[in-house]
Image (cartoon, grey):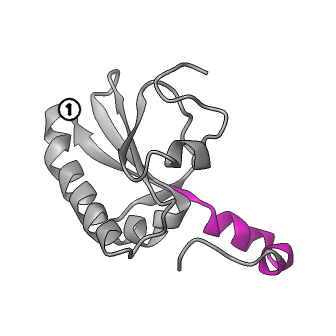
Amino acid sequence: MNGRMDDGAAARNPSLETVLTSWYSKRMGGGVAAFGPTNKVTDAFAALASNHSVSADAAIFSRYDAATNAVTIYFSPTADVMATALGASPCPKPTPDPDLVLVVGDFSSWAIHFPWHKPGKSD
């Protein structure tokens, strides 16, 4: 599955549209302990991207939550195959704020997935 579908299929099956446009998330652990697992995910994604095995708009974002000392990574909808292979679960689209960072993917991913947001600034 590449996260895309024709408009006709979406009209015939709206729940399928939701599934195919789902974001995915995975909690990577707390604080420094999250670096190792996160690096493995980003290295795997970068390898696939270098082989053009992922869509150009596929991206991984992350957020560190100081209150829980947890790092969560978010896979864009077109990174769905990798997300599910790594055990990520469907989730709501993350809210763009200064704590959400682009970990891997083209910088244009910000404009594609959050067109109203300016990275590094509060909305």
Give percent across and percent down for residue 63: 38, 35
Please give the name of the residue rendered at 63% of the width and 62% of the height, measured from the top-left corner: 21
Give percent across and percent down for residue 28: 27, 47
Give percent across and percent down for residue 3: 58, 71
Provide the residue span drawn in magenta: 8-23
Q: Nearer the viewer, residue 92 or 117?
A: 117
Q: Amino acid at mark 1?
A: Gly
Please give the name of the residue rendered at 48% of the width and 68% of the height, measured from the top-left corner: 55
- In the picture, measured across the screen, residue 39 lies left or right of residue 48, that is left
Chief SS of the magenta region: helix
**Residue 9 sits in quarter:** bottom right
- In the picture, measured across the screen, residue 54 lies left or right of residue 23, that is left
SS at mark 1?
helix
Please tell me how crowded label 1 is: few (under 14), some (14-19), or many (20+) other residues with Cα within 10 Å: some
Identify whether 34 is placed above or below 54.
Answer: above
Residue 6 is a magenta residue = no
**Residue 64 sits in quarter:** top left
Identify whether 56 is placed above or below 25.
Answer: below
- State which quarter of the image contains the C terminus: top right
